[in-house]
Amino acid sequence: MAEVLSSSCSSGSGSEAVSGPIRRVLLISAGASHSVALLTGNLVCSWGRGEDGQLGHGDAGDRFSPTQVSALDGQGIVSVTCGADHTTAYSESKVQVYSWGWGDFGRLGHGNSSDLFSPQPIKALQGLQIKQIACGDSHCLAVTMEGEIQSWGRNQNGQLGLGTTEDSLVPRKIDAFKGIPVKMVAAGAEHTAAVTEDGELYGWGWGRYGNLGLGDRFDRLVPWKVETVKAEKMVLVACGWRHTISVSSSGNVYTYGWSKYGQLGHGDFEDHLIPHKLEALHGTCSQISGGWRHTMTLMSDGKLYGWGWNKFGQVGVGDNVDHCSPVQVKFPQDQKVVNISCGWRHTLAVTDRQNVFSWGRGTNGQLGHGDSVDRNVPKIIEALSKDGSSGQHIEASKVDISSEKSWVSPTERYAVVPGENVHGEPVTWFGGKANDLSVPESDVKRMRI
């Protein structure tokens, strides 16, 4: 029998306690500097950076603790997914996808490039039954129950798979998969990967580091089949910023693409242009997640392994040194992990004891601990966890969304670009200089100048 704890929500001027069973965290998702969780009862919480509206609370403020997205109450949300600075959610009962946050390049799917500070339905997807949504830096994809893919947002390298390099402000179906049902899709910074129901692996978009797995460094404007893993059928795929991870039906992990920080896990810092089996992992992998430049794999025994860029402790192994091979992430009482998500510089995990942990960069509150401290080992998020010192304590949105301006046009705000402008030339960094093909080291916002 489930233990019953008190769960409370604070509301602006006063605090109202609501007793009832603990809300179990079902899903977690990490963005560039924000985090989102879905709890039982279809409750959605978000925390971290809110500058672009990605938290959905009707304002541009950061939240340092999990805060209920009140606008989604009663909408029957069953999934949530973070992009870099935007967020999506899906309601099964209403057959509706919602999006909010930074809107440049049309990544919200509403037919414009305006920012949105509270969730709004994507009209073009109304009535489509969705089984999965993937969000990259500036583009999104949705897989329908029939195995079709809708894509929208930025497309300068063909990451939408539509055969062009034109951005799409609304969802459009990828015709290349006609007659080929897709199981799942993953989105990186400017590339995309997919696994079909038949276990075939595809890649398209930006391919300079071999992150498409096609043996070269060229972009693809439409999905291309990865032919080098014919002996294995793939069942899972995930994208980091510029690397890709896949898992075969036998539980083997393959990685390919950019590895300057060891994010491929092969014991070196060499790029791989085709999927390369990760020999260092033993056992069956059940879940994968790619961060900006780090990677996490969850094994079937509940053990979690991480590697790659670790400047802020996002690998979670007690140091701030990059790791080019898998290292086990330890949890109190040897708790087993059941769900993981990598953000740009932070990581989230849910354990079998119904606890949520976070580690890595905390400057905007994305770790959910009520502060802005970086951490290099997992720390329990008290507000979301069964073993929290005071039980769950999820804050309520303190902004009256109805009184706020929902839309903000691009002309009123600066634009953030994911590394290169539409002409392929490096952008200029605000507060820093470009390096590693315009990959920023700091948390400074990027501006197109």
Image (cartoon, grey):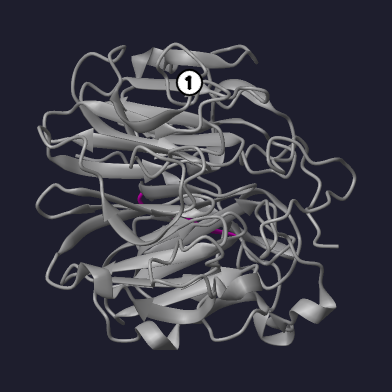
Q: Measured along the vertical axis of the image, is residue 270 above or below residue 57? A: above
Q: Magenta segment: does it hold 17?
A: yes
Q: As drawn, is 146 to the left or to the right of 423?
A: left
Quarter of the rendering containing residue 370: top right
- Taking depth in this image into account, of 438 and 288 the one nearest to the observer is 438
Say if 248 sits above or below 448 in the image. Answer: above
Name the magenta segment's main secondary structure: strand
297 over 191 or under it: above or below: above
Which quarter of the picture shows residue 366? Answer: top right
Viewer-side residue, 118 vs 76: 118
Residue 8, given in percent of the width and then of the height, sits at: 53, 53
Quadrant where the C terminus sits is bottom right
Residue occupying image coordinates x 37% and y 49%:
27
The residue located at (24%, 35%) in the rendering is: 247
Q: Determine which residue is flagged by label 1.
A: 307
Q: Residues within 10 Å of mark 1 (few under 14, many from 20)?
A: many
Q: Where does the image place residue 308, in percent across and percent down from the top left?
A: 52, 23
Which residue: 31% across, 82% down? 94
Relative to 287, does residue 392 appear above or below in the rendering?
below
Q: Is residue 174 visible?
A: yes
**Image quadrant in which the N terminus is located:** top left
Q: Give the magenta part as a residue range.
A: 16-21
Residue drawn at 18 percent across, 73 percent down: 178
Q: Residue furthest right?
A: 431
Residue 393, image x and y in percent?
55, 48
Considering the numbered disc 1 on the image, is that residue within a helix, a strand or a loop? Answer: strand
Residue 217 placement, left or right of 406:
left
Residue 67 on the magenta span? no
Specify whether 429 is left or right of 253: right
Residue 161 at x, y percent in the picture:
38, 66
